[in-house]
Image: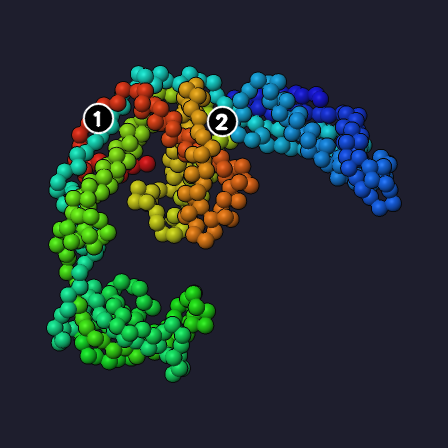
Amino acid sequence: MECVETSEGLSRMYKVSVPKADLQRRFDERIEEIRPQMNLKGFRPGKVPASHVKKMFGKDIMGEVVQALVQETSQKAIEDADVRPAGQPEMHMESDMEKVLSGDEDLAYHMHVDIMPEFEPVDIKKLAITKPVAEVNDAEIDERLGQIAEANPKYEKRAKTAKARDKDAVVIDFLGKLDGEPFEGGAAEEHTLVLGSNSFIPGFEDQLIGSKAGDEKDVTVTFPENYQAEHLAGKEAVFEVKVHEVRAAKTPDIDDEFAKGLGLDDLAKLKELVTEQIQNEFGGASRAKAKRNLLDQLDEKHDFDLPPKMVDQEFNQIWQQLQAEMDAGRTAEEDKGKSEDQLKEEYRKIAERRVRLGLVLAEIGRLAEVQISEQEVQQALIREARNFPGQERQVIEFFQKDPNAMAQLRAPIYEDKVVDHILETAKVKEETVSKEDLLKEDDE
């Protein structure tokens, strides 16, 4: 193998060539390796002549040899240069591959690769990080209990002459018909329906507003085109409805009985769970603020050249997402009125910040020997799969077969562990703030 290197900044270009004689030697070795396992018609098992193997499978076998040699020689070129790649090399074949596969030409290619910059990360022991915290007080707990109570109302019977309003519950019998004929699953008796809950077909609940106990009426609706029952999708149906009762929503008293209705022992247990939930929310917000403060300091304290392809890749992802948001009419207020050039300049700076911070965190993690376990990766994979009910197996198989997807799954786990390591090592000062300040979102 012959290798020539050229460089510009953090970009490297390696020209690699492998003589056709070496290709032929590897080709012959591969044939001798597979011949004992071959079983072709007209030959005894393992006794197929090399000449026949070449005639039948020569190009395919040479293709395997070339692929293996490209991987082997590209890796050796990088190892010999003693550099750390920042991403996968871009390969460009220079040979006529038909001639290479037929054994008539040397294998020649060049590859472009960005390398990791050399820099000394900041001493994390000297970092002073502010971590805002907020107290969980009785008022916050009472507010959350009130929200839970409002979300779980009781319904009390209203007067017979009372007309149903939005948010009221009605107790009804109904019978659905298509073209005058009842259909399966379209009937129920004494069913309680909360108006405005959108639990029935669109338009059904609206037509019951204003009805009162004893009313009988026909409700005409059209099933959605994507309705799960195909025989009903897009069809117009008429429901014969009888209203038995109208019930008003009432926020229940927050007491032991209310807690038991939620499946808990008593109000004390409900308060304990609510307090724990709020503490977890506040804790997550505190860590996020501390992480932001940490990242701002790391960005400020490091200045080095960045791998250009890595920046381009990050910028392209950001820009595609931004364009999708703009196409959907969700342009951020601060971006309105700006030219495309202005936006590209601003978002490239964001891409550069993300790449810089990613490299800094990776180097700090490398020096501290931060590791993530296979169990942590599997837990993350299971969480991701659960986001697609009914398709969990396909999601898991997709990640297991795609190294890039798995790497994207591992990246945030590793970053969080490095951030935790820094927060455990640096000087962290807690600062008490209001709930509003703690939960206020920071700008990007």
| In the displayed structure image, the side of residue 274 where residue 83 appears, left or right | right
Please give the residue where the numbered disc 2 appears in the rendered image.
307
Q: Position of residue 197 (x, y in %)?
A: 27, 62
Q: Nearer the viewer, residue 357 or 223?
A: 223
Give, as a three-letter code, the residue at label 1: Glu
Rendered image quadrant of residue 419: top left
Point 62% across, 18% down: residue: 80
From the viewer's perspective, is residue 353 above or below residue 302? below
- Residue shown at 42% from the left, 39% from the top: 380
Query: Whole-percent x and y of residue 37?
Result: 77, 37
* Residue 51 vertical placement versus 361 (above, below): below
- Judged from the image, the secondary structure of the residue bearing numbered disc 1 is strand
Give me the C-alpha separation between circle 2 and circle 1.
36 Å
Q: Residue at x 31, y 64 (%)?
A: 199
Q: Name the secondary structure under disc 2.
A: loop
Callout 2, which amino acid?
Pro
Q: Could you tell me which quadrant the N terminus lies in? A: top right
Q: Residue at x 31, y 23 (%)?
A: 424
